[in-house]
Image (cartoon, rainbow, N blue to C red):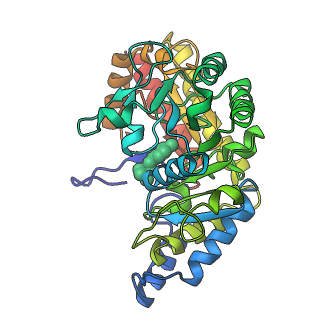
Amino acid sequence: MWDADGKAYLDYVGSWGPLILGHADPDTVRAVQEAAAKGLSFGAPTEGEVELAELLVQRIPSMDMVRLVSSGTEATMSAIRLARGFTGRDAIVKFEGCYHGHGDSLLVKAGSGLLTFGNPSSAGVPADLAQHTLVLDYNDAQGLADAFATHGQSIACVIVEPVAGNMNLIAPKPEFLAAMRELCTQHGAVLIFDEVMTGFRVGPGSAQGLYGITPDLSTFGKVVGGGMPLGAFGGRRDIMEKIAPLGPVYQAGTLSGNPLSVAAGLVTLKKIAAPGFYEALKARTAALTSGLTAAAKRHGVQFCGQSIGGMFGLYFAATPPRSLAEVMASDKDAFNRFFHAMLDAGFYLAPSAFEAGFVSAAHTDADIAATVAAAEAIFARD
Ligand SMILES: *Cc1c(COP(=O)(O)O)cnc(C)c1O
């Protein structure tokens, strides 16, 4: 990546996740150009849209039906409306530090007491709406059980990032996801895996494939659009059939399933299905975080990293955090200094201790080695 002054950077942000093939992948660019030449938008389904939908339901066994939208935000907003329409309930559960786009019901922070409903975290969100969102701690299975014990009758859905990537990278405890599945089933709530970031990023079956948990609905974005605006939500047939025109839950979009976006998504999904793609991506991402961790250790810097598939977290802390509170306790000033030193050296990491990073198929072993060497020089100096 080059900035406006012509300075080169090795990019570990990848447009915040979509660019699993790297920037301007020639096959993707060509497919978009060819699609553009045929027409930018028709407001009617195209062959490519159907092909992408078929590919998605084939790759994600929990998805009987899928609908394409234009962003991750639209996918989560629509999935939540659908869950509310399906259950006839209003309350939703989310976890602190998880980001699900900027739908009004989701820009909510925890209320003052345990098990109390939330307050808006953005101006412009009505408190009347925020009070239907319950915000709990990530990886706290007991907290979720308590919430269901108290509010089970009114909870429409639980929405979660099955690997959290919007508060740095936080790995789920397997028992947390398992308890979530069980509680939702028990109480008739819809389990929504927000895989906008993890979808086709942590592995070919996304996080649900990696952890062997079957959600009721899933949302996708980022990688499935190959760098173009595209999102998707889908899941159980009996739930999806509640969407208009089959059912009473309204959802639509003029540019949904846009042919250019669909073309980029199709090429990307096909290329990442190549044998060995994820093994190589996972190995290269792990080499980055283990290389950085070892370099920090050699210089006595309290730092560690971890990766899941093609996403990674870097922490100025002794061990990887398991909740937002633990991320908050890491040394954020040290992160900020490290970020700026790396940027000066030509390595573009996410500019915040609360973001995950991404390795793409375009990163080479030499790129990883150069990144570790640059970081080591910074660890040695500071
Ligand atoms: C990025 C992201 C979204 C929002 O997607 P947009 O395309 O930016 O609207 C939703 N959920 C998760 C987990 C994300 O990482």
Q: 229 above or below 349?
A: below
Q: Is residue 349 visible?
A: no
Q: Quadrant of the N terminus?
A: bottom left
Q: Is residue 46 left or right of residue 171?
A: left
Q: Quadrant of residue 4?
A: bottom left
Q: Residue at x 59, y 71 (%)?
A: 266
Q: Nearer the viewer, residue 195 or 202?
A: 195
Q: Residue at x 64, y 41 (%)?
A: 191
Total tally of numbered discs in the picture: 0
Q: Nearer the viewer, residue 195 or 136?
A: 136
Q: Is residue 236 left or right of residue 233?
A: right
Q: 263 above or below 190?
A: below
Q: Position of residue 43 (x, y in %)?
A: 43, 81
Q: Position of residue 93 (x, y in %)?
A: 53, 32
Q: Is residue 374 left or right of residue 161?
A: left
Q: Quadrant of residue 118?
A: top left
Q: Is residue 377 visible?
A: yes
Q: Residue at x 53, y 81 (%)?
A: 45
Q: Quadrant of residue 89?
A: top right
**Residue at the extreme top of the image, as rendered:** 300
Q: Is residue 40 left or right of residue 60?
A: left
Q: Nearer the viewer, residue 177 or 5?
A: 177
Q: Position of residue 264 (x, y in %)?
A: 52, 70
Q: Residue at x 45, y 15 (%)?
A: 330
Q: Nearer the viewer, residue 368 or 120?
A: 120
**Residue at the extreme bottom of the image, as rendered:** 38
Q: Position of residue 96 (x, y in %)?
A: 47, 26
Q: Quadrant of the C terminus?
A: top left
Q: 370 above or below 69?
A: above
